[in-house]
Amino acid sequence: MRFSNYILTFSFILAFCLSVNAQRAKLNRAERLMGQHNYTAAIDIYLGILDKGNNDDAIIGIAECYRRVGNPDETEYWYGLVSRMPNAPQKSWLYYAQALQRNGKYNEAKTWAEKYVNQIEPNNTQAMWLIKSCEENVVQDLRASGKLYKVSPVDEVNTENDEFSPAYFKNDLVFVSARDRKAYVKRFNRWSEEENKPFTEIYTVKRNQIGEPEEYTYNYGKVEKFSKGLSSKFHDGPLTFNAEFNEIYYTRSNMGKSDDGVIRLKVYQSKGSPSKYTEPRSLPFNSDEYSVLHPSLSDDGEMLFFSSDMPGGFGGYDLYVSYLEDGRWSPPVNLGPTVNTEGNEVFPFHHESGTLYFASNGLVGLGGLDIYKTKENYGAWTDPINLGYPINTVDDDFGFIINDEQTHGYFSSNRKGKGGDDIYTFTKLSVTVEINVFDEETKMPIEAADVFTPCSEVQNFLTNQDGKVIMELPLNKACDFAAEKLGYQPNSVRLSSKNEPPGKTLYVQIPLKLECIFSVSGTIVDGLTNEPVDSALVRMRSYCGGEEDELSVYTDAEGKYLFRDVREDCDIRVTVEKPGFTKGSVTFKTGTECGPGAVANGVVDTNGAIVQSIPLYCYGPNCDNDTIGGGITDVNIDPDSEKCVKDSIALPDGGVRIEYCNGEAKEIGADDRIVDIDKDGIRTERPSVGTAELVNIYYDFDRADIRRDARAGLDDLITILQAYPEAKIKITSHTDARGKKGYNKRLSKRRAESVIRYLMDKGIDKSRLRAKGMGEEIMINDCYDGVECNEEQHQENRRTEFMIIEYVPPKFGDGKSKRPANIKTNPCTNCPSAPNVEGEVESIESSTNDF
């Protein structure tokens, strides 16, 4: 029995070892096939292994195969399994996040990318760009370019196979395709999932323009092979030509086995014409150790751009350039970290304007390969700009070319079409605007300045290190471009694209003037003895651009106070109080000029310092010197006027007379009429408010100007403010939910500023006005994002409300403006509907606590 057990145990062990060895042999074979880019065969082997039971190596291998053939659905499934393994390869979380992004699952993709950055590779730029790409506002901005391009497939060229990487050959189009399935062709490509897919060859098609030239409509002829002499046994293309079209550079696969079994790609040069090209010449930077592919020759023939995974790059495939020097190509130069990432940068196209277009999956994008543009500036490449939707999608978009006028072109994409990669044509419906923001005095560029325009759905742009922003502007549009930067005065410029041809570049210069920063200081003294008053509370209220801020300090032992970093062009009110003393205050305006000798509302600025010393007067029995006189003990402060009150006397008609310490007086009648009495007893009756009402005013869609029907309400407000000089008003302006939250915030600020300007023009002091733009944060009905409402309902939300915040006369109850009985609604044509929610309300800067 014991011998039988030994035999049985040995048999199990032997069977297990044989099974393990067989599995290992299959895994080794699949890995060799992957090295040869034969992913289809490798997938079959991995699936066969998994049919017999779970195997982590097979799951990891099949996930990588699907990633390399570009199947995001399968990649998401398999890398979802890999990512949850305890022995998961380090990059699996990143690859899983990329697949989720490709499938439009931005929140999940962001979560896994953040997990990768936090736990595995904190400085991985590819992961950090992916995180940024998944932020909701970034996705919306990239999708906001839809009206700038007209995109359509070239159905005459596309098939169920791959067609990609178009190139211009004189007036014709040349492209790469895997369409040849003739029975006698036994050269099949195993790089993709599809069985028996032919290797790529170079094809051409003639184009004949029809209709108006600016419409860029073409008839396409019969698709033919470009040149029999260029066809090889394996992959050919992509390619590029010189300006005379008698020289060609093209990618070709080297199917000879390298030491590691990996198939490499190389770039070759030939001369001649399609009927006869010279023997291919391998370029000097080709190697059996790495791949060189996707050449693009500059218009002058002196620079050759290409992609390569040669050692020393930033990860994956990088873009390089070689220079023609004395008839020989120089050693390649990496384009650097501004362009290249830890992902893949491929398919470059150099335009004669100096713009380099390329595809990348390592920068901020919509998913997969996106198309970007950059330009060399003084030896450095500018930050790449994503071309946005519909050029880019969540799928792979690459192989971009554009005509000399930069108005029309082609690109390839594996988005849903006839099958595989297809070729698409596009027409530009915009002009390019290059905005240069610079210091007005030094003329130096200003980096990281905010640039806004209502003509773009992109919320805002940031200038690059050269102080520039490049954007697209729709045709026949007049737009304001505003720039602002902390420490500078904002500025704006208007530009019109009317009658400008598509593709033209317009230039906008926006100089910013350095903002003056002041300090406000002084000494608080006893008005009679001139001794310093310590521990007095000093409050400084500043009113800048319709917004209010308040700071407070206590005087030191020498009676001194100091406020730093006070902005220019602000109305300032400094008030001082201390028990046993009268209140003191001073008002002034900061200037707009800096430096010694500058004057701020009559106050001389000395090296940015505004000095305001304020006397206080002691009163009551505790004073060594009762500066008021009479030892008054029941003295308080009139909160309406901030004056020292000597006495309050009831009047026969039910009103009250208030007598001030400085000899002035005020009588408030039972009918709410007010009479001011000066030191000489001269009486001045204030204007009566009569039937004046405090009501909301309203605006047209996307407008900030004061409508004619709003003037009556504002004139009533002016009457109230004139009747009650102590009163101060809070102004809150709002928009409806249509449009971007950020844009609506700025629009509401402009509406508030329009009200301030109107009131100031009528003589109301700016220091009495507090204003804030609330954007679309507070609706008075349910017309928030995603809710369908009619125009009358939207109109109710486009409003400015008023509230008396200091000295509210009894006549006005709570001091809040009311909704008028009738609200005029002007017709609104082509107004958008309310979008779906653009982001959490918390993501918008809150305004409700700023008053």
Image (cartoon, rainbow, N blue to C red):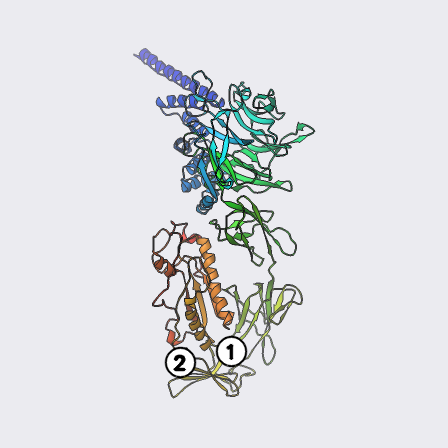
The secondary element bearing badge 1 is classed as loop
**How far across and down, in percent of the image, does residue 785 sit?**
37, 52
Q: State the residue position of label 2.
A: 672
Front-most of 829 and 752?
829
Closer to the camera: disc 2 or disc 1? 2
Note whether residue 13 is visible.
Answer: yes
Quick one: label 2 or label 1, which is nearer the N terminus?
Answer: 1
Vertical placement of residue 783 versus 282, above or below? below
For this orientation, the residue located farthest to the left is 1
The secondary element bearing badge 2 is classed as loop
**How far across and down, in percent of the image, does residue 655 sit?**
39, 84
481 displayed left or right of 713: right
Count of numbered tags: 2
Amino acid type, label 2: Asp
**Callout 2 environment at 10 Å: few (<14), some (14 to 19), or many (20+)?**
some
Q: State the residue position of label 1.
A: 580
The quarter of the image holding the N terminus is top left
751 displayed left or right of 254: left
**How far across and down, in percent of the image, does residue 60 sit?**
43, 28
* Corner quadrant of residue 724: bottom left
Front-most of 332 and 113?
332
Amino acid type, label 1: Gly
Mark identifier at residue 826? none
The residue under the point 64% across, 67% down is: 598
Vertical placement of residue 508 versus 394, above or below? below
For this orientation, the residue located farthest to the front is 211
* Corner quadrant of residue 99: top left
**How far across and down, in percent of the image, does residue 776 sit?**
41, 57
Front-most of 614 and 35?
35
